[in-house]
Image (tube, helix red, strand yellow):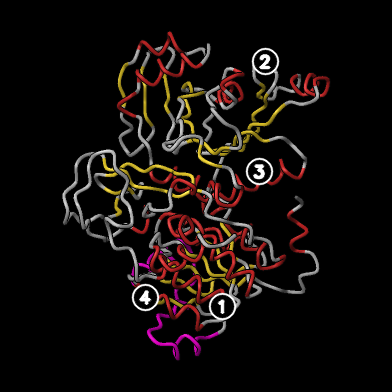
């Protein structure tokens, strides 16, 4: 797509942006990028810590004299046209003149609440909080369509980037057998020293693993089994990964490859050989699936950067002989090709989604359905009375391992991100999923949206 067309004949139109959950992580990267984007201006940010908002905006380079802390609807409405409004009560955002609301809190109660109310006021909503979309996405897309507004996932996070790549493939009529992403942190092995490094956290866990040399070159699925044994302590089913694939599943109709996904430890050059059907030497027991891999690379090789991929069938032999010569990632049997985007730049990319939504109405997916549901499965016996809490970098729940279930098998499952703050009403045995009769998840807006969403046909 030629993005410069977004700015043609706009007659001075601008996206007027408000950000909820604005000062850290994703929100920070977006705040830093907005001043560089033509036809976009920051109007409002919301955080429980307004003083922190002032510090962050000043650090980035916003004019401190234009920052106005507002505590009432009247103050918001009376703020100068060129002011940047700072609020602690997110509900006040809807009293401003924003055209675009970006939700970054990760809090399902807050984000579903503000999203519904914004869409009903025809304010476009750009959802960064994937936890909310995993349970409310179908209904939020419906509400947007019914009210002539845009609800959209955002570029810069893997789900939207993957959906863009997938839609490009579908537009071209490609036969797509698998879609997915790399898990966030690379596995890096030094060929000269045998030093292995896991690229998570400030200290990068590392150790000497000479055995990696024997499985460095891919020779089939048995290579994957051997690699996994070598790095088993670094392997995990990550809540954020499954949540992101949940979002993609619900829009594309593609189902989980496995309830815990496959997570092969793989190099980029091997992906077409791996993410294909078992009968063709790969790991997939079915096609039309979402999946995740752990990127293995040498110290001097580029990262996949938590990027996205699709694997397609190579249907015209002569055409693919030509394309193989261009260096594309094609399976050894020449039946499959992996096409990939080795990046996701967080808020740096997100203005693209906002401009596409505000200027062209692109984003809403009324076809979105609850195709898959993220479940929490007990890793050990958990007694009644235990309070479940979403916490940590990966937004996980202590004692539970996430699984991604097809909706047809998950009618009684309590969605993972509706469990936050609930108390177990019964004992749960190791290996059991948390079901709706074990916790009380009713009485909240996210639950109401989820319940309505699973009724959509």
Dot placed on the residue nearer the N-terminal end, 4 or 3? 4
- Quickly name the residue at label 4: 88
Q: Is residue 215 above or below residue 246?
A: above
CA separation, marks 2 and 3? 24 Å
Q: Which mark is residue 120?
A: 1
Name the foreground residue: 55 vs 248: 248
Crowdedness near tag 1: few (<14), some (14–19) or many (≥20) residues, C-alpha within 10 Å: some
Dot placed on the residue nearer the N-terminal end, 1 or 2? 1
Q: Magenta part of the protein: which range?
A: 51-80
- Quickly name the residue at label 3: 165
Q: Which mark is residue 333?
A: 2
Dot placed on the residue nearer the N-terminal end, 4 or 1? 4
The magenta stretch spans residue 140: no
CA separation, marks 3 and 1? 30 Å
Q: Is residue 307 above or below residue 296?
A: below
Query: Which residue is outermost to the top?
Result: 214
Dot placed on the residue nearer the N-terminal end, 2 or 3? 3
Looking at the rendered image, the disc whose residue lies closer to the viewer, 4 or 2, is 2
* SS state under label 1: helix
Residue 58 visible to an observer of this rendering: no
CA separation, marks 4 and 1? 22 Å
CB contact under 8 Å: marks 4 and 2: no
- The structure residue drawn at horizontal position 32% and vertical position 45%, both measured from the top left corner, is 433
């Amino acid at each position: 797509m030629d993005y410069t067309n977004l700015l043609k004949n706009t007659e001075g139109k601008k996206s007027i942006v408000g950000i909820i959950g604005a000062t850290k992580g994703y929100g920070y990267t977006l705040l830093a990028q907005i001043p560089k984007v033509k036809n976009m201006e920051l109007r409002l940010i919301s955080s429980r810590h307004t003083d922190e908002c002032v510090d962050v905006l000043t650090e980035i380079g916003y004019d401190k004299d234009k920052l106005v802390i507002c505590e009432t609807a009247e103050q918001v409405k009376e703020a100068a046209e060129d002011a940047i409004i700072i609020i602690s009560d997110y509900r006040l955002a809807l009293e401003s003149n924003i055209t675009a609301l970006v939700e970054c809190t990760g809090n399902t109660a807050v984000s579903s609440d503000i999203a519904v109310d914004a869409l009903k006021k025809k304010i476009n909503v750009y959802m960064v909080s994937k936890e909310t979309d995993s349970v409310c996405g179908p209904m939020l897309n419906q509400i947007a369509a019914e009210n002539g507004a845009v609800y959209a996932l955002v570029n810069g996070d893997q789900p939207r980037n993957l959906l863009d790549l997938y839609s490009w493939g579908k537009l071209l009529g490609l036969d797509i057998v698998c879609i997915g992403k790399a898990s966030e942190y690379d596995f890096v092995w030094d060929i000269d020293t045998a030093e292995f490094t896991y690229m998570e956290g400030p200290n990068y866990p590392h150790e000497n693993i000479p055995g990696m040399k024997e499985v460095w070159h891919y020779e089939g699925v048995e290579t994957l089994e051997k690699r996994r044994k070598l790095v088993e302590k670094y392997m995990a089913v990550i809540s954020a990964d499954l949540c992101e694939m949940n979002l993609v599943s619900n829009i594309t109709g593609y189902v989980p490859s496995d309830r815990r996904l496959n997570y092969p430890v793989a190099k980029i050059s091997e992906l077409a050989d791996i993410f294909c059907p078992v009968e063709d030497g790969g790991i997939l027991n079915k096609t039309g699936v979402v999946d995740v891999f752990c990127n293995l690379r040498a110290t001097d090789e580029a990262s996949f950067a938590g990027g996205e991929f699709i694997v397609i069938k190579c249907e015209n032999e002569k055409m693919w002989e030509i394309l193989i010569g261009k260096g594309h990632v094609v399976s050894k049997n020449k039946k499959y090709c992996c096409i990939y985007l080795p990046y996701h730049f967080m808020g740096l990319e997100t203005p693209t989604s906002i401009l596409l939504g505000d200027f062209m109405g692109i984003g809403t997916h009324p076809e979105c359905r609850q195709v898959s549901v993220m479940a929490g499965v007990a890793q050990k016996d958990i007694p009644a009375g235990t309070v479940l809490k979403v916490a940590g970098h990966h937004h996980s729940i202590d004692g539970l391992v996430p699984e991604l279930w097809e909706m047809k098998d998950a009618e009684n499952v309590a969605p993972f991100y509706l469990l936050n703050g609930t108390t177990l009403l019964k004992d749960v045995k190791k290996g059991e999923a948390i079901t709706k009769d074990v916790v009380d998840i009713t009485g909240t807006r996210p639950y109401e949206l989820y319940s309505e969403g699973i009724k959509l046909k």
